[in-house]
Image (cartoon, grey):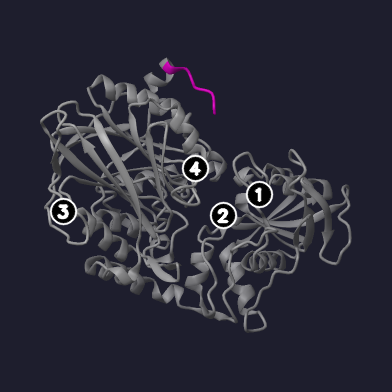
């Protein structure tokens, strides 16, 4: 785990910023779940225990009108998520709605084309109580992130009111003042009992965004920041503590072992922490590690976390905690009418921009990678970028592809959902040896990021140790890539700047800026011999 910073120095940088609120809500019985009044009797103390419900969302990414599938059933969308949260909230008057970051960024056009204001507006309407930052909140820069949350003007929109609930973040500091840009924690009183909430975002965020986007802020170690905040909460008598952490963690099922940075963090944070909401990895998580309940509810509003707590009103301690990850199946509920109308309003406003038809897909072309690491959509996009910039090779980072190309008519809206970041294409020169370095950087300390390629074929061997898993490199006609020969390469500006730890791209020479990636993709598809097709053709091969 990362080394801790000097505690006294950080304690000075993370002052106590406490805002206390009293939460109450109307209570409605729901025959679909156990009835509760928010209290139960405790034999141990003779007092009534307080039942608190925390409903959590992570990595929504402004997917207001995007439907996905789980088990062959439609899921997601802001109006269905709102309906589920409203239904669950009505079951317990002691309910708080929380989120663990990445509510914006990589968003659908109905949010991204309006500077992400629609996503925040929907969160306000749903009634979220508290949240934290994710790395994608920084996509448009710190200044714009602060405007979106606190309210204000920008050059493209009128005044926006901002988030109607507080954001917390203990480990992002103003570089000049060394103080947090948001309160590190907040005390919420539920039925008279104080619950402390702490927010953190991955300190690896600088590797995930353009360096200009985080000018003026610094990121410190998450565990250090959490433990300092816990200490200050404990000094104020708070014994029920929840962390909202945009930190990755995952399980393949409820009974499977959990992995990821949040698991290691749970072992290091103060034992007064009871619950940690995770994010970033877009995965399932519902387990207990070192006495802390860890949850993550997939992504894109396809699920949410329902954490049920019992608190002793005398000791103020959480004495019981259990969680459920709830999938937002459309066929089990009706969409919230207010949210549905709001989303349709935004859809109408962007129609003239996004309804352009660019072609027809013969079948679903997906970003799902096979066991070698290759995907049909990755191949198609990489081919488009290589063609536009007329280079020998092209590389696409997998995190840049955010949706699938579905069979049938293809609109510009679909392309904007697939490639939502609007990165420029960059042409550069790399040697064969530098290309090998790039490909070996796919194996990182916590995950594997398989680049999608065009014009190149290569083999890799997972049995090789260290950072040298690439075996052979060829051009697409079967010619070996020569280590000291120079080749022309296309990447996005994100990769050109070393994003996702692909620092070898920073060594590229003779860099030339090209068009926006999604516009390049649109023009490529419009010129495609219809219908649009893409196949797995052995560009990436795993040695067996």
Q: Earlier in the sequence, mark 1 or mark 3?
A: 3
Q: Using the image, tell me which numbered label, if any, was put on residue 258.
A: 4
Q: Main secondary structure of the magenta part?
A: loop
Taking the image as shown, residue 80 lies to the left or right of residue 45, namely right
Locate residue 38, reporting x and y percent. 15, 45
Q: Earlier in the sequence, mark 4 or mark 1?
A: 4
Locate residue 2, reporting x and y percent. 54, 27
Figure disc tally: 4
Residue identified by numbered label 3: 35
Dividing the picture into quadrants, the one containing residue 377 is bottom right
Taking the image as shown, residue 203 lies to the left or right of residue 162, namely right
User: Which is nearer the eye, 114 or 222?
Assistant: 222
Please tell me which residue is depicted at 74% across the width and 38% down the height of the picture: 466
Can you see residue 125?
no
In the rendered structure, are the residues bearing label 3 and label 2 in contact, judged by CB atoms less than 8 Å apart? no
| SS category of the residue bearing label 1 | helix
Residue identified by numbered label 1: 496
Q: Is residue 395 magenta?
A: no
In the rendered structure, are the residues bearing label 3 and label 4 in contact, judged by CB atoms less than 8 Å apart? no
Mark 1–mark 2 distance (CA, rounded to whole Å): 15 Å
| SS category of the residue bearing label 3 | loop
In the rendered structure, are the residues bearing label 1 and label 2 in contact, judged by CB atoms less than 8 Å apart? no
Mark 4–mark 2 distance (CA, rounded to whole Å): 22 Å
Tell me the quadrant of the picture where the N terminus can be found. Answer: top right
Q: Using the image, tell me which numbered label, if any, was put on residue 399.
A: 2
Q: Residues within 10 Å of mark 2 (few under 14, many from 20)?
A: some
Q: Earlier in the sequence, mark 4 or mark 2?
A: 4
Mark 3–mark 4 distance (CA, rounded to whole Å): 31 Å
Mark 3–mark 2 distance (CA, rounded to whole Å): 42 Å
Please state the extent of the stretch shown in magenta in the rendering: 1-7
């Amino acid at each position: 785990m990362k080394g801790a910073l000097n505690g006294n120095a950080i304690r000075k940088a993370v002052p106590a910023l406490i805002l206390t609120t009293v939460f109450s809500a109307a209570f409605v019985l729901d025959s679909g779940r156990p009835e509760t009044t928010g209290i139960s009797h405790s034999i141990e103390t003779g007092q009534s225990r307080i039942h608190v419900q925390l409903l959590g969302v992570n990595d929504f990414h402004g997917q207001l009108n995007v439907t996905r599938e789980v088990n062959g059933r439609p899921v997601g969308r802001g109006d269905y998520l709102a309906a589920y949260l409203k239904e669950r909230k009505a079951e317990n008057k002691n309910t708080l709605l929380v989120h663990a970051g990445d509510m914006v960024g990589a968003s659908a056009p109905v949010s991204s084309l309006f500077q992400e204001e629609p996503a925040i507006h929907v969160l306000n309407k749903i009634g979220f109580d508290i949240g934290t930052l994710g790395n994608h909140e920084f996509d448009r820069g710190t200044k714009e992130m602060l405007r979106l949350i606190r309210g204000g003007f920008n050059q493209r929109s009128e005044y926006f009111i901002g988030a109607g609930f507080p954001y917390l973040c203990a480990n992002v500091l103003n570089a000049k003042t060394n103080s947090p840009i948001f309160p590190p924690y907040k005390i919420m009183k539920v039925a008279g009992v104080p619950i402390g909430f702490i927010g953190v975002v991955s300190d690896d965020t600088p590797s995930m965004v353009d360096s200009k986007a985080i000018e003026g802020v610094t990121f410190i170690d998450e565990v250090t920041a959490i433990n300092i905040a816990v200490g200050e909460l404990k000094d104020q008598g708070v014994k029920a503590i929840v962390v909202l952490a945009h930190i990755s963690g995952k399980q393949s099922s409820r009974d499977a072992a959990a992995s990821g940075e949040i698991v290691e963090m749970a072992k290091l944070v103060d034992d007064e922490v009871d619950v940690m909401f995770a994010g970033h990895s877009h995965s399932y998580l519902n387990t207990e590690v070192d006495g802390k309940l860890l949850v993550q509810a997939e992504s894109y509003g396809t699920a949410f976390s329902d954490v049920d707590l019992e608190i002793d009103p005398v000791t103020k301690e959480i004495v019981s905690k259990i969680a459920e990850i709830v999938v937002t199946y459309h066929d089990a509920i009706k969409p919230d009418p207010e949210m549905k109308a709001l989303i349709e309003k935004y859809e109408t406003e962007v129609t003239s921009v996004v309804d352009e038809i660019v072609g027809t897909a013969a079948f679903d072309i997906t970003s799902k990678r096979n066991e070698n690491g290759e995907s049909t959509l990755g191949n198609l996009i990489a081919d488009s970028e290589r063609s536009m910039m007329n280079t020998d090779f092209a590389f696409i980072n997998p995190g840049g592809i955010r949706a699938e190309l579905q069979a049938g008519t293809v609109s510009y809206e679909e392309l904007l959902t697939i490639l939502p970041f609007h990165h420029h294409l960059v042409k550069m020169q790399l040697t064969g040896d530098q290309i090998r370095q790039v490909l070996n950087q796919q194996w990182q300390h916590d995950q594997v990021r398989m680049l999608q390629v065009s014009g190149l074929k290569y083999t890799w061997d997972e049995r090789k140790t260290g950072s040298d898993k690439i075996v052979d490199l060829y051009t697409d006609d079967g010619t070996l890539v020569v280590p000291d020969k120079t080749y022309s390469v296309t990447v996005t500006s994100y990769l050109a700047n070393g994003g996702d730890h692909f620092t070898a791209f920073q060594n590229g020479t003779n860099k030339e800026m090209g068009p926006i990636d999604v516009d390049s993709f649109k023009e490529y598809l419009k010129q495609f011999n219809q219908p649009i097709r893409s196949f797995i053709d052995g560009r990436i091969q795993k040695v067996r």
